[in-house]
Image (cartoon, rainbow, N blue to C red):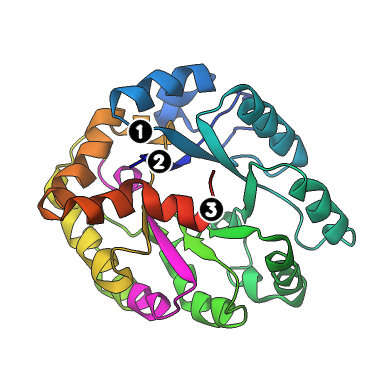
Amino acid sequence: MPGIDAHQHFWKYDPVRDSWITDDMSVIRKDFLPINLKPVLRQYHLDGSVVVQSNQSEEENEFQLKNAQEHDFIKGIVGWVNLQAVDLEERLASYKSFNKMKGFRHVLQGESQRDVMLSPGFMNGISKLKPFGFTYDILIFPDQLQYIPQFVRSFPDQKFVIDHIAKPNIRDKRIESWKKDIKAIAQFENVYCKISGMVTEANWHNWSRDNFNPYIDVVVNAFGVKRILYGSDWPVCLVAGEYGEIIDIVKQYFSSYSTSEQDLFFGENAIQFYNLS
């Protein structure tokens, strides 16, 4: 069964645009391109990946579409589009002509208005995605989880996925409030969850696999094995460990699961969610 890394990024490093890469993340202050990831995926028996936007511009989409055109292992793109633009439907129709453009994401975690996803303009934009078959990645911090039930309830036919298990504070072992909110969101069958991005929420230089098991337990128990996706968050994850260490966290966790359940998590669910070919 094909293995898919459902969450990774490419960029040509730009110190101004990529100012989110702080001094303590200097290991990723350089270019990360398809030629860098391809051998890594092959090493860990993964057949392809979904590249996710890391810059909120349509230039980013053009960059990733070019990458995907030149590299067959890139199976899908989660891009960015201004959901509140007056010409949104024209933009979506344009992107629909690219087979590998699968969905969109906005960096909600960085918005000063914490419930911006509930604003009429944003909600109107989300309502336009389903007719074009586009998915939506929800990138938030735990304080924003409280708004997500109302958000996803409004669009029962829209496919959503929570990125990075909503970034709980693993470093300080905070779990109870996040756990309650995750369980509430998992009630909605149209919402999936990426088990990704966990190491960056832990102590980068002093974590062990055991730190993550309680959080994975919550997600698996809440969403079940058919609505969870594997993502590495490469190259961001490199601030806290090598790719092999990152994938080993979930390989060890799911080692007691059946082969068919592991196939769902490591590929089939991503193929189904993003409609990958």
Tell me the residue at 68%/44% (across/down): 56
**Residue at the disc numbered 1:** 46
Are discs 2 and 1 less than 8 Å apart at CB? Answer: yes
**Residue at the disc numbered 2:** 4
Q: Quadrant of residue 236?
A: top left
Q: Quadrant of residue 46?
A: top left
Tell me residue 276's x, y (percent). Answer: 53, 46
Q: Is residue 168 left or right of residue 250?
A: right
Are discs 2 and 3 less than 8 Å apart at CB? Answer: no
- Viewer-proximal residue among 20 and 49: 49
Residue type at tag 2:
Ile
Magenta-tinted stretch: 181-203
Q: Is residue 105 left or right of residue 209?
A: right
Identify the disc placed on residue 274. 3
Image quarter (top left, top right, bottom left or bottom right) of the C terminus: top right
| On screen, residue 104 above or below 245 | below
